[in-house]
Image (cartoon, grey):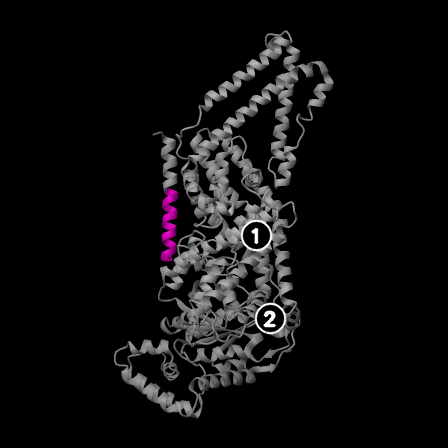
Amino acid sequence: MDITTIIVGIVVLIAAFYIGRHVRGLFKGTASCCGSSGGGCSGCSGCAPKPKK
Amino acid sequence: MDNAATIKIALAGNPNCGKTTIFNNITGAKQHVGNYPGVTVEKKEGRCTYENNSLLFVDLPGTYSLTARSLDEVVARNVIINEKPDIIVNVLDASNLERNLYLAAQIVELGRPVVIGLNMMDIAERMGAKIDLEKLGKKLGATVVPLVGSKNVGTTELLRAVMEVAKKGEVIENAEVDYGPELEPAIRSLSDMIQKNGSIQYPVRWLAVKLLENDPDVLNKVRVIEGTEPIVAMAQTLRDSLKNKVDLEFCFAEYRHRFAVDAYNASIVRTGSNDTLSDKIDRVLTHRILGIPIFLGLMWLMFTSVIDLGAYPQDWLDQGFGMLGDYLGSVITNDQLRSLIVDGVIGGVGAVLSFVPLIIILYFFISLIEDTGYMARAAFLIDRIMRACGLHGKSFIPMILGFGCNVPGIMAARTLDNEKDRMVTILACPFMSCGARLPVYTLFIAAFFGATGYGGTVLTAIYILGILVSIGVAIVLRKTAFKGETEPFVMELPPYHIPTIKGVLMHMWERTVLYLKKAGTIILGASILVWFLTAYPMDVEYSQDFDAARDQVTETMEMEQAAILQSYGVQSLEDDAALNTMYESMITTADADAEAADAEEQDVSDVAQAQALEEKPEYPAGFADLQASNPTLYAQALPLFDAKVKADDATAALDDQQNSEKLSQSYAARLGHFVEPVIAPLGFDWKIGVGLVACTAAKEVMVSTLATIYSVEADDTHEASLVTYLANDNSFNPAVALSLMIFSLLYMPCVASLAVIKRETNSWKWMFFSMGLGVVLAYVFAFAVYHLALLAGLGA
């Protein structure tokens, strides 16, 4: 197995892991529909406001 | 993390009074705002620092009362009662003060320090109304701060007032609602008993009122506290005795209303005009007969603009990604890595990203419609139809929110008081066409309807079909699985606002960032997976030895050329320098012509252009000059050139066949061929089958999947646009495009929507029901549309 195949394999595994974790997060309410984590889907447009001085 | 010095402030008020705008002004957040009720359905928190004090603001869903009839009212009330914010900022709409004061009457009862934020002062002034802020403050027992949230006027004054109240600590100066001679003695008796008991943490007078009102939520909360049985029993006894004298529910509401009217009368110096500009505009836009045609006309204008204006920047981006793919394809030497980057990442994500301009234009129009207040009018117009069908008019607000994204639409069903109406709305909402489906429609419209000029009309028709199916599903569910009485609903039409440039730009920016975020995360992940399924396995069995076949083609060409040269009395081309020069010139001219065609015309934008390209002349235009320079040599070199072209074409055909055979044995093709028999009656081939499976992750993945499949199948020398691939693919035609657009509209919700349906209904059953309903309706409608389109001659 050459190095390219290993790199491609790792990339594909990361993509699969990310999709799986994202779907799980959606059902648990810890991922938002836009792909960012935290806050659940209702937090989409909010995206954790920074404190304003 | 909260620290001891953090001051917690709840923002409460009627729906659409501008709480979220004020919240955004204070905290710098970018929560979605809209000029219609029901945009916020969950509490949102944001922080700011003022004069070295840390302030935590909680934006609550808008409510007309604190009776906790619907889920959003429960959220608002629970925050105030259970979380005990240090201060409540009650935002009132100054242009609609009397009605807003009804909620204020209930908020002052809650026993927390209150600051009144009198918002929309500019509109009240435009209407000619004048309010005495000091008198209003005295009547409510609170500081009143005038605000214009849309222009960020009064924010600092509000923060100053909040700090002043905070410094006073727990000193409550709120006014009390006088419930009259019948109810007050009962309230006092019950209050005394609650106070003596001492185990309940809720505000005493408020609790006494709620127990006498028989509020089920409060009653349940009190019952679970030990030692409260005598309080519950006494409340029941008092209620029974009062029931004979007064209508309790009506009586409590009546006295609160009197309090609101009294505060209004005391503070209003001059009432505004009853016949405002908004009323005059509404006479046309919500006209019984003209209203719906105007709504449809505006929708058509919006979608035609999206399609026509967006086509140019979309084409530029498409070409840009094509060039990027070509460049990376020439730089990366390893076949696997090149295919991953060029076909998977650039091909898949690039195809989705090229639709960003259309998304920006769509949300420009949507934010205009929302911010002006026309969205509420659209809901009002549809409400008439819905009520005629026995549906709750309020259901349409969540459905309209679904235009942006189905997820907040489904969540907005919380504003419905009736559980059956809420469930029906949740299940009907996914049929509203969300922004994620727009790239799918525009892709197929560009490929098959772009030249007809009916692109905008097709897009409008799809969105209207979504609305009709949503209403139809709601009607059927309300008359079957969720049968029951509908509750009365009075719809509030907010005054028209002139949208601010900042507001519109912010809204467009938010949605664009979300789209980009989605493209860089879920769509990127899905594209890589689809690429893997499409490009693997690498070692496939071909029908023939393609390398040997290519060698055979080259050999045949060389033999043909040798025979031609022999007829001229020449052994090889090198022996005749002039002939060789002419032959090389022909090849150079043809290559230059092909490159120019690649750069300018190869990326066709529709089928008509593809046909025009096929009808181009046999030889490049530059050949005329070569012929003119030496007709004899030209005539001798031409058969040699023809033999080379024939061989090149044969080699290209072999390449295509090899790619096609490799693709047909890929994991993706196996999956696609597995579902193909089921979807074939809709005109779909296995590639669409793969797209339909993949797009459950997100609707845009249909576009990235098709882009990846076509990119892997094509040769690597030039990355054409997806529109080009589709327009040149014989398995696609306008009938298939229509069928697929309808299927994408009605097909099961994306996984994010399914997860929210599961969470909001707390049931796997309804989530699977939603999936099944989507698949069945999509199949039935797509089948009907496909066969009708074939009958109409759109199958070619």
Report, in whole angstroms, how far the alpha carbon at label 1 lies from the one at label 2: 26 Å
User: What residue is disc 2 on?
Assistant: B495
Q: Locate the N terminus of chain B and report the quarter of the image it occupies.
A: bottom left
Is residue B6 in view from this perspective? yes
Tell me the quadrant of the picture where the C terminus of chain B can be found. Answer: top right
Left-right relation of B328 to B231? right
Residue B247 in which image quadrant: bottom left
- B274 to the left or right of B753: right
Q: Position of residue B599 (x, y in %)?
A: 61, 33
Q: Specify the subunit that label 1 lies on.
A: B
- For the residue marked with disc 2, what is the amino acid? Pro
Residue that numbered label 1 is attached to: B360
Name the residue at the left extreme.
Answer: B227
Residue B486: where, in percent of width, then height? Answer: 47, 74
Q: How busy is the neighbourhood of tag 1: few (under 14 within 10 Å), some, or many (20 plus)?
A: many
For the record, the magenta segment spans: A14-30
